[in-house]
């Protein structure tokens, strides 16, 4: 008898082993996804549900840890699947169905496309979004692209280096940055967006936290709105018990509100906000545990570019963090992110091409 260990962190190893032994590619992929382990945390459960969960775990061969009001389950996706089916869920666990079904669907088959204003961005490869700051005080490149002609030239460079979208921002989001008047922000972003749209450079995203700016940008030709909170208080908000789970929960609630407000699910991308209201340690935990965000079932965008937590790890100043950014993007791709917001597209593209090559055999 010969024993060979297979990589457990990816379904590719199991899929390849099955295909090499005669399985067709698609059944092999679904089988490989099914045997992958999942760890899920259940919160706000009753004592009766906790008891039912423990009983089910004993019968199903799943590892179950519980406490007052919560349960943690580790099992292969195929073992968890019956809990998401109304006709097979054990008595007492009926409330699990919808949310678990969403997690299992994202685990087996992540979103394949992002709908933007009548066009489709395919997500079978890393989609790079180029950062175009038209601010005098951005933490990374403040003042370099304030003039419209210089902003357009930078946009053209970003597109040439592999960007599929451009993200225009008129207010610095660095921690502690002063607020910008709405009219000033509009005056910064609208002329640039108009010129980008006229030259058909895009799609164009506007990076703002204000609805009037978003409306003006859309009127000028933007098709994506990338909104954030306030930079002046973010450092005081870095209080988490479990950063990945809490960020995922907040994003899930925000996406649900968007859907309830009429935004189609296929138009939503979620971003865990690297560098915003998080310590360096929390950013790295979030990067490593990105699966919690991916499990929401929406495409995931990440923006680690030149952030402080990368400098914390490397000791490099802000203008020398593009290599670290590229590594962070590659790690995020492996963990399920598909959209990457960066300053230096060329370096990030190469790292993502290598990361993508490890998962392209499917």
Image (tube, grey):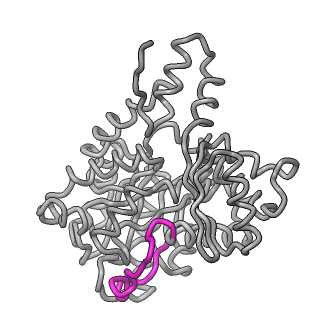
Q: Residue furthest right?
A: 87
Q: Where does the magenta region start and end?
A: 227-245
Main secondary structure found in the magenta portion: loop
Q: Determine if the magenta segment contains residue 279.
A: no
- The percent coordinates of residue 231 (x first, y second) are 36, 82
Q: Which quadrant is the N terminus positioned in?
A: top left
- In the picture shown, does residue 211 fall above or below 317? below
* Residue drawn at x 71%, y 45% as measured from the top left: 81
Instruction: Pick the residue in front: 354 or 86.
Output: 86
Instruction: Pick the residue in front: 355 or 22.
Output: 22
- In the picture shown, does residue 236 fall above or below 293? below
* Residue drawn at x 49%, y 70% as measured from the top left: 247
* Residue drawn at x 24%, y 44% as measured from the top left: 347
Left or right, residue 256 beside residue 134: right
Q: Determine if the magenta segment contains residue 228.
A: yes
- The percent coordinates of residue 58 (x first, y second) are 67, 51
């Amino acid at each position: 008898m010969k024993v060979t260990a297979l990589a457990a962190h990816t379904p590719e190893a199991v899929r390849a082993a099955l295909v090499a032994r005669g399985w067709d590619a698609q059944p092999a992929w679904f089988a490989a996804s099914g045997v992958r382990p999942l760890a899920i945390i259940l919160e706000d459960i009753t004592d009766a549900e906790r008891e039912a969960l423990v009983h089910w775990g004993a019968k199903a061969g799943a590892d179950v840890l519980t406490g007052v009001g919560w349960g943690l389950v580790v099992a292969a996706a195929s073992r968890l699947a019956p809990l998401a089916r109304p006709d097979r869920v054990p008595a007492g666990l009926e409330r699990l169905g919808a949310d678990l079904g969403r997690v299992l669907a994202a685990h087996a088959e992540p979103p394949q496309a992002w709908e933007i204003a009548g066009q489709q961005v395919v997500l079978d490869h890393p989609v790079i979004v180029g950062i175009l700051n038209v601010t005098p005080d951005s933490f990374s490149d403040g003042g370099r692209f304030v003039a419209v002609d210089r902003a357009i030239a930078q946009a053209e460079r970003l597109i040439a280096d592999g960007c599929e979208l451009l993200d225009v921002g008129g207010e610095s989001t660095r921690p502690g940055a002063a607020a910008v008047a709405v009219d000033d922000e509009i005056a910064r972003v609208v002329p640039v967006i108009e010129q980008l749209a006229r030259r058909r450079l895009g799609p164009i995203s506007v990076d703002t936290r204000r609805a009037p700016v978003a409306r003006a940008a859309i009127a000028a030709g933007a098709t994506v709105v990338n909104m954030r909170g306030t930079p002046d208080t973010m450092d005081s908000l870095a209080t988490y018990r479990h950063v990945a789970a809490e960020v995922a929960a907040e994003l899930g609630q925000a996406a649900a509100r968007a859907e309830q407000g009429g935004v189609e699910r296929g138009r939503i991308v979620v971003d865990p906000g690297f560098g915003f209201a998080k310590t360096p340690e929390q950013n790295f935990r979030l990067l490593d545990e990105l699966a919690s965000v991916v499990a929401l079932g929406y495409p995931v965008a990440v923006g680690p570019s030149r952030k402080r937590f990368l400098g914390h790890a490397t000791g490099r100043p802000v203008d020398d963090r593009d290599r670290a950014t590229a590594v962070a993007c590659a790690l995020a791709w492996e963990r399920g992110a598909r959209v990457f917001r960066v300053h230096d597209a060329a370096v990030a593209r190469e790292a993502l091409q290598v990361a993508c090559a490890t998962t392209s055999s499917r």
